[in-house]
Image (cartoon, grey):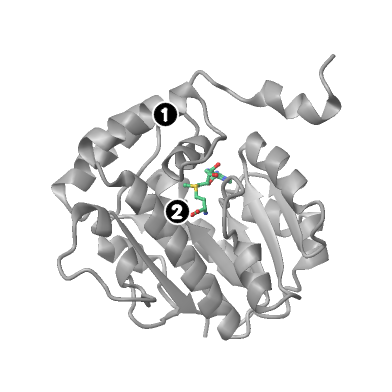
Amino acid sequence: MADKSDEWKSSIDTTRPSIARAYDVVLNGKDNYEVDRAFVAEIVKVVPEIYDVAAYNRQILGRGVRFLTGQGIDQFIDLGSGLPTVQNTHHVAQGENPEAKVVYVDNDPMVLAHGRALLAENAGTAVVTSDLRRPATILADPAVERLIDLTRPVGVMLVGILHHLHDDEDPQGIVDAYMAAVPPGSYLFITHFCASTQEARDAERQYLALLGTGRFRTPEEITGFFDGFELVEPGVVPLPLWRPDGPVPEKLTVGHQLMYGGIARKP
Ligand code: SAM
């Protein structure tokens, strides 16, 4: 008989790739199925560096969260947080400030199952299984109300997720709704697939055909998400160029430029 803790498995669709599981593939994780690996194999044909791109994204996530804790941010809403992996937001934030609180939000059932197990021991974190396209629902969730004090600055993270929202889903309106709910001094942290090269355009076609989402926006469109906020240096740039810990590549490859990111402060 199925264990109650295994009930989530019945809601997993293994006939088509999932965003969370495909990302797990490129992070060399174990929480994925053949259909996810087959999808990634198609992406590798157009962007062989896709595994490196995932690593750049995780690296900027770490640098960005450290930057934010350095600005005094001690509470984070991590939207589209993904399957638990090494150096998650709460590891980085609580490594800097053990009192930091993190609410993870994701709509993939596998994220909830794994996340709950991982976070059960950590009173400063919670996982909300919900659709981030409904900001009012997320913000009213008991876990957010318990862990996040919306009268104090918050780090709002949309890392590697806005490109999975189509234009007609009003990604700007969704960003604005979250940022309207947090006070001045809060920060917005975005990384995003960028239509920077022909290979990126080819990858976009594959994402849309095989996964159903993947809108590669221009640097100007990505920068537009931060309208009304103060971008911190160096602005919206290819991921390896955002406040690097070490030497930066002299000549940027397709992979270096496949995602752009930035952080801005709400004045
Ligand atoms: N933020 C993590 C990172 O950058 O390392 C994970 C990024 S992963 C590419 C995107 C995540 O967003 C996936 O786990 C997926 O399940 C989740 N996601 C996609 N659409 C979503 C939605 N509408 N609401 C909540 N989560 C969503």
Q: Is residue 254 left or right of residue 119?
A: left
With respect to residue 141, does 66 lie above or below?
Answer: below
Local SS, label 1:
helix
Look at the numbered disc 2 and say if its residue's Cβ is closer than 8 Å to ligand 1. Answer: yes
Q: Is residue 23 left or right of residue 201?
A: right
Among the 4 quarters of the image, the one containing residue 75: bottom right
Residue 132 position in % (x across, y down):
59, 50
- Which numbered disc, 1 or 2, marks the residue closer to the eye? 1
Q: Is residue 189 left or right of residue 71?
A: left
With respect to residue 216, does 123 lie above or below?
Answer: below
Badge 2 is on which residue? 160
Sequence order check: which comes first, mark 1 or mark 2? 1
With respect to residue 8, does 114 lie above or below?
Answer: below
Residue 37, numbered circle: 1
Local SS, label 2:
loop
Give amino acid for label 1. Arg
Residue 30 position in % (x across, y down):
55, 35
What residue is rendered at 54% in x and 63% in y? 157
What residue is rendered at 70% in x and 46% in y? 115
Among the 4 quarters of the image, the one containing residue 10: top right
What residue is rendered at 30% in x and 72% in y? 241
Residue 46 position in % (x across, y down):
21, 37
Among the 4 quarters of the image, the one containing residue 8: top right
Q: Residues within 10 Å of mark 1 (few under 14, many from 20)?
A: some
- State if disc 2 and disc 1 touch (CB < 8 Å): no
Real-space CA distance between mark 1 and mark 2, rounded to the nearest whole angstrom: 19 Å
Give amino acid for label 2. Gly
Residue 244, numbered circle: none
What residue is rendered at 34% in x and 52% in y? 53
